[in-house]
Amino acid sequence: MNNTEFASLVGELKTPLPTQKTLVDELRAKIAFAESSGIILSQYVRTLSQVLDEETAKVLTELKEDDVYIKSNADEKKLLLYSRTSELRARLEYMEKLEELVKRRCSLGQSLLKSVDLETRASFNN
C-alpha cells in the first residue's frame, strides 16, 4: 500500500458512518422536496388541462367550418379533433402519470418514516 492509497483509506475511515438519525433526516428532506415538487407538478397539470380544453374548443370552432369535418361521421370527427390536439394530450397524460408517481413515492416515504419511528419507539420501550 503506497502513501496515496493509505491517505485515501485514512480519509475514508475519518468519514463517520451515517446514523439512523442522519438517514431519517435525509429521507425527510427528500420527501419534503418530492412533496413540494408534487404541488408544482399538480399546478402544471391543472394549467395544462385548461390549455387543452381551450385548444380543443378552438380546434372545434375551426373544424366546424371545414367541409371535410362537416361531412365526416362521429368517429372521423373524433379522430380529426384528436389529431389536432394529440401533442397536448400526450404531454398532459405524461404529466398526470408523473404526478401519480410522485404521490406514490411520497406515500411510500411517509410509510417508511412511520415504520422507522415505530421501531425507534419500540426499542426505547424495551
Image: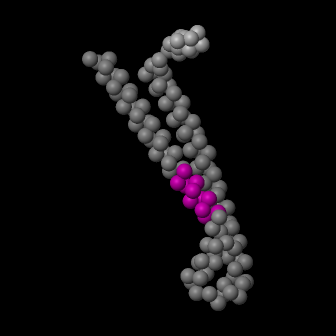
**x 61%, y 72%: residue:** 82
Q: Where is residue 93 drawn, in percent x and y?
A: 56, 59
- Residue 89 in the magenta stretch? The answer is yes
- In the image, residue 6 sits, relative to residue 28, either above or below, namely above
Q: What colouring does the structure picture have?
A: one colour
| Residue 64 position in % (x across, y down) | 69, 82
Q: In the displayed image of the protein, which residue is found farthest to the front?
A: 1
- In the rendered image, residue 101, in percent from the top left (x then y), is placed at 50, 48
Residue farthest toward the bottom in the current orientation of the protein:
71
Where is the C terminus found, in terms of image quarters?
A: top left
Main secondary structure of the magenta stretch: helix
Magenta stretch contains residue 21: no
Does residue 11 show up?
Answer: no
Task: Report the residue at 43% width, 40% height from top.
Answer: 108
- Asked where in the image residue 65 lies, by quadrant, the reply is bottom right
Would you say 125 lies left or right of 91 here?
left
9 vs 120, nearest the viewer: 9
Which residue is drawn at the image coordinates 67% and 72% (left, top)?
Answer: 84
Q: Is residue 38 left or right of residue 50?
A: left
Q: Which residues are magenta?
A: 88-98
Residue 58 seen from this side: yes
In the image, residue 23 above or below residue 15: below
Q: Residue at x 65, y 69 (%)?
A: 85
